[in-house]
């Protein structure tokens, strides 16, 4: 029985670790910089009337897939190392990450997170569809795709990169 508990603990730990590492690097190395320096993510994900369902499923636009791949890349970069510790935990983390992508985009379908799940997510600081929708409406708020505790440092990073972009642009004039 102890072996089963240890195995489940190891699988759970690696899954959560993958989600934490992936969300951190995706937020700070792709998502926030893309909002400052790029137009790609914003055009795909934040323009008026853009929805995950419409752009990822209905249009079959390859740019949407590329945006998704770039956002998911940090998860896959760390997967080989975590695989050595727990293949099942790594697979579970990737599956949970993908399910969260789908879930956080159900807000376009007038989704309302049940109160109990909302309380659990708020306690664990997991991004709900309602919170993610705040980011869709205002691309300068509510960073952290899976974990919303990444938002405060992402806001600081956003301002640093924006300041750098401003100084860089004005140094060329």
Image (spheres, helix red, strand yellow):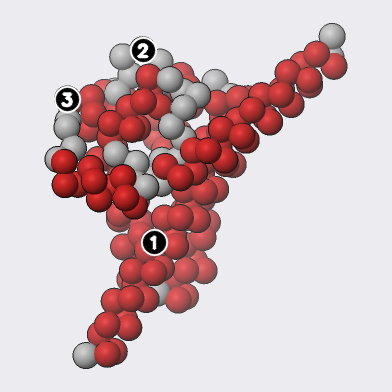
Q: Residue furthest top?
A: 173
Q: How many marks?
A: 3
Q: Position of residue 50 (x, y in %)?
A: 33, 19
Q: Position of residue 45 (x, y in %)?
A: 40, 24
Q: Secondary structure at mark 1?
A: helix
Left or right, residue 70 beside residue 46: right
Q: Position of residue 49 (x, y in %)?
A: 31, 14
Q: Residue at x 36, y 12 (%)?
A: 48
Q: Secondary structure at mark 2?
A: loop
Question: In the image, is residue 142 above or below residue 80?
Answer: above
Q: Which label belongs to residue 74?
A: none
Quadrant of the rendered image containing residue 36: top right
Q: Residue at x 44, y 60 (%)?
A: 18
Which part of the image, by quadrant, shows the N terminus? bottom left
Q: Which residue is mark 3?
A: 110
Q: Earlier in the sequence, mark 2 or mark 1?
A: 1
Q: Which residue is mark 2?
A: 48
Q: Residue at x 85, y 16 (%)?
A: 171
Q: Residue at x 53, y 38 (%)?
A: 152
Q: CA distance from mark 3 to mark 2?
A: 17 Å
Q: Which residue is mark 1?
A: 16
Question: In the image, is residue 45 above or below residue 6?
Answer: above
Left or right, residue 38 beside residue 131: right
Residue 11 appears in the picture as rendered = yes
Q: Position of residue 58 (x, y in %)?
A: 24, 25
Q: Are marks 2 and 1 in contact (CB under 8 Å)?
A: no
Q: CA distance from mark 2 to mark 1?
A: 33 Å
Residue 98 appears in the picture as rendered = no
Question: In the image, is residue 100 above or below residue 54?
Answer: below
Q: Residues within 10 Å of mark 3 (few under 14, many from 20)?
A: few
């Amino acid at each position: 029985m102890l072996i089963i508990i240890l195995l489940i603990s190891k699988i759970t730990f690696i899954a959560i670790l993958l989600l934490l590492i992936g969300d951190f690097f995706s937020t700070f190395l792709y998502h926030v910089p893309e909002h400052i320096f790029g137009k790609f993510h914003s055009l795909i994900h934040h323009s008026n009337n853009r929805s995950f369902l419409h752009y990822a499923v209905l249009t079959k636009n390859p740019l949407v897939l590329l945006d998704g791949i770039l956002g998911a890349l940090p998860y896959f970069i760390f997967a080989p190392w975590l695989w050595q510790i727990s293949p099942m935990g790594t697979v579970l983390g990737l599956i949970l990450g993908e399910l969260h992508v789908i879930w956080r985009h159900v807000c376009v379908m007038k989704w309302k997170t049940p109160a109990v799940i909302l309380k659990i997510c708020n306690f664990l600081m997991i991004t709900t569809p309602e919170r993610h929708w705040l980011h869709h409406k205002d691309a300068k708020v509510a960073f952290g795709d899976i974990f919303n505790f990444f938002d405060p440092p992402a806001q600081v990073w956003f301002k640093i990169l924006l300041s750098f972009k401003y100084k860089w642009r004005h140094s060329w004039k």
